[in-house]
Amino acid sequence: MALQALIETKQKLSRKEREEAFRRDIVLDVAERLFAEKGFDKTTVSDIADRSELAKGSLYQLFESKQEIIQALVKQKVDKVTSIIQEVLDADLSPFEKVLLSINTKFEAMWESRDFAKIFINEFHGFNWAMDISILSEHFGTIRKMMFKLGDQIALAQKAGDIRDDIPPMVILAMLGGISNALTRMWLGGEINVSREEAITIVRNMFIDGVIPHGGGKAK
């Protein structure tokens, strides 16, 4: 649905607007790879323009600065992930199943955007969206809103008896984030050699073992 909405939006643009959007997407893809390879500070606008096969002046017509490029890149990724997670939350699943599926969603997103994930690991100290970093703070409200929605699903799963109810929902969510972030750093950094599916299974199992009610509960 999110992809279809994006396609429909682009179809409404004029030819000139579509061409500009296409060039912007190319620049963002190139910048993502360069930031991951060289680091944000060491990558220059000239580097991005050269690899994008654009004149430097043409690139400045699309983005005013390198800072604007990274901001656009972050927005692109945040919008995509929050849209996918919203689809998970809207799905006809139990609250516990939605929480588990959100784990899959995160790792699928990291796998598809490994360069972007490396940028945050290397440049911005992981995935701590609450840090006082201007690039992140602009999007913190969006991320925070999605986190509270997942917290609501955890609370509903607690009421259903699928998750132990002696821990506040947001603490459980933080625990899930900590487990998945730590494994993601090691996974993308090459410290552990596991497939995407194995990484998802590890986090799901560690999460489930920690939150199922004492005595077994309903979660299996």
Image (cartoon, grey):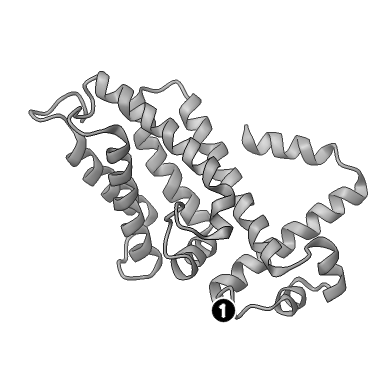
Q: Residue at point 7% right, 28% down?
A: 215
Q: Position of residue 130 (x, y in %)?
A: 45, 52
**Residue type, label 1:** Lys
Relative to residue 7, is residue 194 drawn left or right?
left
Secondary structure under tag 1 reads helix
Q: Position of residue 199 (x, y in %)?
A: 33, 53
Q: Residue at point 21% right, 21% down?
A: 161
Q: Which residue is mark 1?
A: 38
Examine the image and state in which quarter residue 62 appears.
bottom right
Q: Is residue 50 above or below residue 101?
A: below
Q: Residue at point 42% right, 50% down?
A: 107
Q: Position of residue 214 (x, y in %)?
A: 10, 30
Examine the image and state in which quarter residue 69 appears.
bottom right
Farthest front residue?
Answer: 132
Please tell me which residue lies in front, 103 or 42. 42
Relative to residue 184, is residue 65 drawn left or right?
right
Q: Is residue 131 above or below residue 12?
A: below
> Which image quadrant: the N terminus?
top right
Farthest left residue?
Answer: 215
Q: Position of residue 33 (x, y in %)?
A: 60, 69
